[in-house]
Image: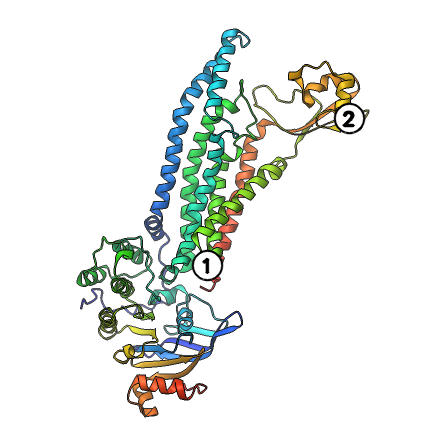
Amino acid sequence: MTARTMPARPDEDDAGLRPVPWRRMAGVTWRQHRFALAGVAVLLGGLAVWLWIIGTPLHRDYAAAVACHPASSPACQNLISTFAASATSNFMGDKGPGGVLLQLVPALIGAFVGAPVLARELETGTFRYAWTQGFGRWRWALAKLVLLAVVLAAATAAFGVLVSWYFQPELGPGPYQTSPLITLFGLREVTFPAWTVAAFAIGALAGMLIRRVVPAIVATLAVYAGLAFATAAFLREHYLTPLVTTSINFNLPGTGTAWTISQWSTQGGRFAFAGNPPDSLVNQFCSSVPADKVGPLGFAPCLAQHGYTQWTSYQPAGRFWPFQWIEGGWLLALSALLIAVTIWLVRRRAA
Amino acid sequence: MRSMNVVKASGLGKRYGRTWALRECTLEIPAGRVAALVGPNGAGKSTLLNLAVGLTGPSAGAVTVLGGRAAGAPAALDGIAFVAQDTPLYKNLPVADMIYLTRRLNRRFDQRYARARLDELGIPLKRKAGKLSGGQQAQLALTLALARRPRLLVLDEPVAMLDPVARHDFMATVLAAASADGVSVLLSSHVLTELERVADYLILLARGQVRLAGAVDDLLAAHGRSSLEELALAYLRESPSAVTR
């Protein structure tokens, strides 16, 4: 029988013993989660190569179209349509497969890395090993969750920069512009890592509560989808008070496209209609407005002659960075809260 | 031999929903013993062990370990190594990684002992823990626990899933640690014959309550029985409600 090589227990009185150093969890976390992290690296790396390959010609076409003068010449119009065709065929925009695919990335990373962290331990019984080591169970959970969250945030922040580069032709001033506050807003420099960390924190808590890997992943994806939808549909437009204008040229030159929140008209100081003018009004006053000029702003000059004032509330494109930090800020605060709840459950929950 | 108690429970109780898994448990297990926690399935053995290692918290009363440390506190975990039922290991990690994890997660770890012992047992370091036989997995978990050089080794049904040879080898390792290194041992089992050879202290649990606790020799003498098995069976049959401390 092998004898133990250390001297018999030094009867160090461990009343004031120092805890196992935090840094030791780095190697532990890596050994246990290297396959998940490698999966994240492969996913993000593959997408990055894909964005680079299709983004390079797109940027070339865009640069040629923007540099062309005078813009109305046939040669320039040709360049613009070349870029538009290239953009369409490369799945640009959040309605195309490219955009939709990217929307899934934070949810997938969060669910597949976050949910198993605790659920697998609880499902396989290994928590009885992990939580009885000298490191201590809540410290173990804290170190692991924070380390993984930081690594994921760093990787996805880098990827968010690449996404911003790829979609810059669409978002910048030019022939194909859309508002940066709408298109792929959740996949940019700040929001991409913030949503990924939020999905990870949701996953960790779901894993602790559900204690099964697969149901925890499903629950994470469901909660994430609900949160992302509610944010885009209801919450984001309220980050800052919208500006209100009666001008129809509220997009300042060079700042990109504003996000129109709502439009309505008044007549003689009283509310007339919201959004598009009713057909009766159009038929009465503005039947001659050309077909490509429809919409509230299209009819505004015509109806103004009949005493109607067109109002627009909007978020200017210049608010992109404040909006990024507001969304990133509350998502990170939410993530910190979810991780704190998870650790509290690890600490007190009977196993 | 230290005079401290490795486990001390007073009025300890654990309730799951409306059922008390353990009730009014008061006992003191002295250091330097191989203590056997015996009782039928569902008697509360695992509950008592989980309370002692801090995996679960008490619903009533209190439990301290290693001379007054709160169960589950870092100072307590530092001196206790626990091998849970079915010896949970990370099945997808190689044996070497299990050694690495245990070394990093504890202040003390006797790497040379762990390596030498696994070598003796013929357990390859590169093999994944999940690919080892049941006996090897149990030996790996025990080796990792002993390499932490604990003062108290807690084993929950350690041999229940093992074949007779693996059982014998496992218990031999436990006994060697107890006699050579003075590790106190607390192990639970419902296999009485297994404990006969190793245990010198007995705690008999039934229906969530302590029925009998004391040094094996004293108990045998006091109750006029010749073997631990005979004593335990008689006690479980004849006096289900009596409580002796």
Cα distance between the residues tagged 1 and 2: 58 Å
Q: Determine whether A47 is above or below A120 in the image.
A: above
Give the residue type at disc 2: Thr
Q: Secondary structure at mark 1?
A: helix
Q: Position of residue A145 (x, y in %)?
A: 43, 50
The residue labelled by disc 1 is A346
Residue drawn at x 48%, y 62% as measured from the top left: A348
> Which badge, 1 or 2, is on the more N-terminal residue?
2
Quadrant of the image for the C terminus of chain B? bottom left
Q: Which mark is residue A266?
A: 2
- On the image, which quarter does residue B239 sit in? bottom left
Badges 1 and 2, same chain: yes
Q: Determine whether A190 is above or below A79 in the image.
A: below
Q: Determine whether A33 is above or below A305 in the image.
A: below
Residue occupying the far right of the picture: A268
Q: Which chain does tag 1 point to?
A: A
Q: Secondary structure at mark 2?
A: strand
Q: Position of residue A82 (x, y in %)?
A: 47, 15
- Can you tell which of label 1 and label 2 is closer to the viewer? 2
Q: Nearer the viewer, residue A351 or A347?
A: A351
Q: Which chain does tag 2 point to?
A: A
Q: Is residue A12 visible?
A: yes
Give the residue type at disc 1: Val
Q: Position of residue A62 (x, y in %)?
A: 47, 18
Residue drawn at x 31%, y 53% as measured from the top left: B92
